[in-house]
Image (spheres, rainbow, N blue to C red):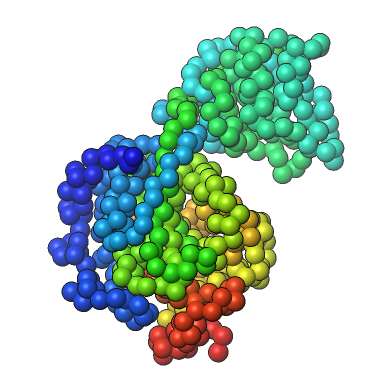
């Protein structure tokens, strides 16, 4: 059963955000014809159509506390909107629910030393509240270091040798000091942060400080960590080597205060697939639908989600050679949970039937660069396994950009978006990206415009990621790029996996007819 979270009210607010006529974007011909060629499809995929969907996402956030994070009513309203649009377009639609760990900081935190030297530490500079930390205040009590000898060994000792807090016996066996009613100070090392926190709470600690290793020059600063899920109830923070060593080895007192929600909630992925096409050769395209809890996420990732929705609607009457499967992922912002859950849930046959996966996460950044996922490792530094066939996907993006005379550059494939689960399990993958918290260089500003020295998206993961936080120029261009790539592979994946399709949909034939600039392979 699918939830409906005030969808009528959400849709009523959409039109207030749109310019007159934008809600019915596209010509009359686009409403009736079959967009089974590139020129037809690109004529009908419009930035006004994409903005209509972004307006709906903004309205969903506005009606629900300013966020569309998974596990919140704002996400559920966004999901209902996507499901309704895809069902109306005639797709086979499934809403797949799953449980996940929800975390949100609901108020300010503090971390202080009261004695011997009164010090108030600064959030994000001296410490960080770990994701899935419990909530509460410890009061002014003792900091107690636990099993620190191995981790304090001087460089170049193996930094993984610190087992501080990794075993329950660390808190009970002599000469361990009692942590009952105190704050346990533990060192980063050989086990998960969650193991340390669970053991400390079980031993009676009322708070945990995990400090960095120090015997590794790259691990001196603040520990930005996660407990991986809602595993406990006490406050847990990460800090620097210097602060942690001071608290652990002196008779210090102080307190930690956190205000968080850490619990298991339910959210969903939305899967919409074409009724026609070879189900043993599936072309998948996806974008995460959720925002972070601190904002509406209309660029991250309302841009990719809206473009995907616009393309899907305009392809609704197409009879593709290969089945096309569109996906809107939940809980991406909390660890790629939705896409990983989806991949894990596939049978071997279902997994083998996916020919390729295209990912669209942040494609309209205000201070943009046109990044293309590095499918052939030519940029060096990919941090995950990338199937070699991914090079074909990258090249198609590059060739399309070249056909339009649009500068672009590669970006590394890693674990930051939903392509991850597909790539590492052997499914060829690719996608577009226009930048997040990275800083635009002077060379990039000269090539793409915009402001050197500023973030690609100045509102990344903040409350100002609203309907206004977008470059219409690059959103328009990338929406066409999304459409071109999906339709090309929907008709022919021979270049990826040898499966023959419609001959006129070989990439080189599509590009030659597209524009006068030619391609990057000429």
Tell me if residue 251 can be seen.
Answer: yes
Q: Is residue 211 above or below residue 296?
A: above
Task: Name the residue rendered at 37%, 73% in the picture.
Answer: 319
Task: Name the residue rendered at 69%, 38% in the picture.
Answer: 220
Q: Quadrant of the N terminus?
A: top left
Q: Where is residue 230? Give x, y as percent.
A: 53, 28
Q: Quadrant of the C terminus?
A: bottom right
Rendering quarter of residue 316:
bottom left
Q: Where is residue 496? Give x, y as percent.
A: 58, 73
Foreground: 4 or 287?
4
Tell me if residue 405 can be seen.
Answer: no
Foreground: 256 or 421?
421
Foreground: 370 or 505?
505
Q: Is residue 113 above or below residue 370?
A: above
Task: Name the residue rendered at 72%, 32% in the picture.
Answer: 191
Q: Where is residue 472? Give x, y as percent.
A: 32, 66
Foreground: 253 or 225?
225
Q: For the image shown, how many numbered marks are present on the structure?
A: 0
């Amino acid at each position: 059963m699918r939830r409906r979270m005030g969808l009528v009210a959400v849709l009523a607010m959409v039109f207030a955000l749109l310019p007159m006529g934008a809600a019915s974007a596209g010509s009359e011909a686009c409403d009736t014809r079959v967009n089974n060629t590139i020129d037809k499809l690109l004529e009908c995929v419009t930035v006004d159509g994409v903005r209509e969907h972004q307006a709906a996402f903004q309205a969903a956030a506005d009606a629900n506390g300013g966020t569309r994070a998974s596990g919140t009513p704002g996400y559920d309203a966004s999901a209902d909107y996507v499901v309704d649009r895809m069902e109306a377009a005639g797709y086979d639609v499934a809403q797949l629910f799953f449980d996940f760990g929800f975390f949100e900081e609901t108020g300010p935190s503090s971390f202080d030393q009261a004695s011997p030297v009164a010090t108030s530490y600064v959030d994000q500079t001296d410490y960080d509240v770990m994701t899935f930390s419990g909530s509460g205040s410890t009061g002014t009590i003792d900091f107690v270091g636990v099993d620190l000898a191995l981790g304090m060994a001087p460089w170049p000792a193996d930094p993984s040798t610190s087992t501080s807090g990794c075993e329950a016996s660390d808190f009970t066996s002599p000469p361990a000091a009692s942590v009952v009613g105190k704050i346990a100070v533990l060192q980063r090392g050989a086990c998960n942060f969650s193991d340390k926190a669970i053991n400390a709470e079980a031993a009676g600690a009322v708070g945990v400080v995990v400090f960095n290793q120090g015997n590794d020059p790259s691990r001196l600063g603040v520990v930005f960590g996660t407990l991986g899920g809602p595993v406990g109830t006490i406050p847990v923070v990460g800090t620097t080597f210097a602060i942690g060593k001071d608290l652990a080895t002196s008779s210090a007192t102080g307190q930690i205060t956190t205000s968080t929600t850490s619990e298991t909630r339910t959210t969903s992925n939305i899967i919409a697939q074409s009724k026609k096409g070879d189900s043993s050769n599936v072309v998948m395209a996806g974008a995460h639908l959720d925002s972070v809890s601190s904002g509406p996420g209309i660029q991250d990732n309302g841009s990719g989600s809206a473009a995907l929705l616009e393309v899907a609607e305009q392809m609704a009457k197409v009879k593709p050679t290969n089945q096309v499967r569109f996906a809107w992922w939940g809980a991406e912002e909390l660890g790629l949970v939705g896409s990983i859950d989806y991949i894990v849930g596939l049978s071997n046959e279902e997994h083998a039937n996916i020919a390729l996966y295209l990912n669209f996460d942040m494609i309209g950044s205000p201070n943009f660069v046109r990044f293309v996922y590095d499918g052939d490792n030519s940029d060096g530094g990919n941090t995950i396994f990338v199937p070699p066939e991914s090079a074909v996907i990258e090249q198609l993006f590059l060739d399309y950009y070249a056909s339009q005379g649009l500068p672009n550059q590669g970006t590394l494939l890693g674990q930051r978006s939903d392509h991850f689960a597909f790539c590492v399990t052997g499914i060829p993958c690719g996608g577009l990206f226009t930048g997040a918290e990275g800083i635009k260089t002077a060379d990039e500003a000269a090539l793409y415009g915009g402001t050197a020295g500023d973030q690609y998206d100045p509102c990344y993961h903040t409350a100002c990621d609203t309907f206004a936080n977008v470059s219409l120029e690059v959103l328009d261009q990338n929406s066409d790029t999304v459409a071109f790539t999906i339709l090309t592979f929907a008709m022919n994946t021979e270049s990826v996996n040898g499966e023959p399709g419609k001959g006129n949909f070989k990439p080189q034939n599509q590009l030659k007819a597209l524009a006068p600039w030619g391609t990057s392979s000429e």
